[in-house]
Amino acid sequence: TRGNFETTIAALEGGVRGLAFASGMAASHCATMLLESGQHVLAGTDIYGGTYRLLHKICCRSGISVSLVDTTNLANLERELRTETKMLWLETPGNPLMSITNLRQATQWAKQRGILTVVDNTFATPVLTRPLEMGIDIVVHSATKYLGGHSDLLGGAIVVGDPDLGQRLYYTQNATGGVMSPWDSFLASRGLKTLELRVREQCRSAQEIANYLAQHPRVSRVLYPGLSNHPGHALATEQMDGGYGAMLSFEVAGDLAQAKRLVESTKLFRLAVSLGAVESLIEQPATMSHASYDRADRMKFGITDSLVRLSVGLEHPQDLIQDLDAALAK
Ligand code: PLP
């Protein structure tokens, strides 16, 4: 059953080998286990808080160091490059600021320097972005999110385009044991059958919600690559396949307490850190998904206290807008 899911996700990502894990973090951890003591990782500043924690608080125990860089400007990579840099870790759209990184250029830069490239493709899914086709070495997923799509499974996945790399990762996975269970594998395979339909519809709703928020007087900033004023809009239009994703963030014109009140006031948007399912979710990165960042790093990277993140589900977009409208009025 696990093999079926692995074959399908490998095909969707255009890879030759898929590996299914017990969670997204187990998949990410397996990828980092390719590194050895003394080596260095470059990672984006706009990444999942759990990945930040894995790199900074767990990998460091094995003598692996990490530097975070704003990967929307690849000139930044050169500044942090060391002789021991062996991995480049990217998310696009980034989390939680929806920053867009140029995957073709990042691949080119890394290949010339013998650096392995990893993309956490959880937000975009293979429906919208297929990093292996752009030369990326390793795609990582939290299958808990869009791939499963119904908030009822835990899982992760790795897909690669090189069989030897796939074998090395499989060896580590088999040796450490974080595999996806048969039941979760069944649910993940079933989720994949509707992945494209769900993602396309959710993208359409997210665009409507972003347009609504962009004109709301109590909202100071909307971060959605589908908005023409988003700094990554042109690149996303070129790199993403017919949609800008169903994740978006916005800043309320207020402080941490007001943002907290907002996320606790919606009724259709349920308050939770997860994402990517048919049910819409709302959360506050500073106290939830990115609480594991050091506060100083959050401030430095623009993850402000008044930031709110939405995962847009399959409810009617007008109902979702009404829900936000009522909560903003509060
Ligand atoms: N990657 C991203 C982008 C995520 O948002 C998450 C979870 O929120 C993970 C990885 C970790 O996945 P999991 O919760 O399945 O361990």
Image (cartoon, rainbow, N blue to C red):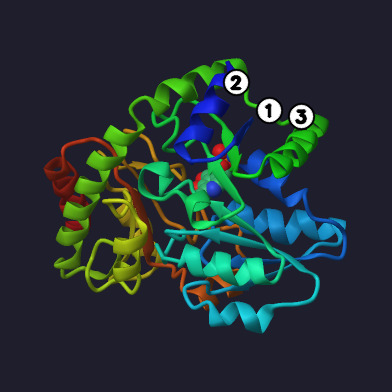
Is label 2 within 8 A of ligand 1 (CB to nearest ligand atom)? Answer: no
**What residue is drawn where x is 38% and y is 64%?**
307
Disc 2 to disc 1, how far (Cα)?
9 Å
Badge 2 density bin: few <14, some 14–19, many ≥20, Cα 10 Å? some
Q: Secondary structure at mark 2?
A: helix
Q: Secondary structure at mark 1?
A: loop
Residue 106 place in picture, x, y as percent = 54, 68
**Residue carrying label 2:** 2
Is 20 on the left or on the right of 206, as rendered? right
Amino acid type assigned to the residue bearing label 1 in the image: Val
**What residue is drawn where x is 20% and y is 47%?**
204
Is 306 on the left or on the right of 228, as rendered? right
Q: Is residue 45 visible?
A: no
Among the 4 quarters of the image, the one containing residue 19: top right
Q: Secondary structure at mark 3?
A: loop
Residue 47 place in picture, x, y as percent = 54, 60
Q: Earlier in the sequence, mark 2 or mark 1?
A: 2
Viewer-nearest of discs 2 and 1:
2
Among the 4 quarters of the image, the one containing residue 141: top right
Q: Are marks 2 and 1 in contact (CB under 8 Å)?
A: yes
Amino acid type assigned to the residue bearing label 2 in the image: Arg
Q: Are marks 1 and 3 in contact (CB under 8 Å)?
A: yes
Q: Is residue 194 visible?
A: yes
Q: How many marks?
A: 3
Q: Nearer the viewer, residue 238 or 174?
A: 238
Amino acid type assigned to the residue bearing label 3 in the image: Gly
Q: Which mark is residue 215?
A: none
**Residue carrying label 3:** 177
Q: Earlier in the sequence, mark 2 or mark 3?
A: 2
**Residue carrying label 1:** 179
- Above or below, comparing residue 247 to residue 25 in the picture: below
Q: Nearer the viewer, residue 323 or 242?
A: 242
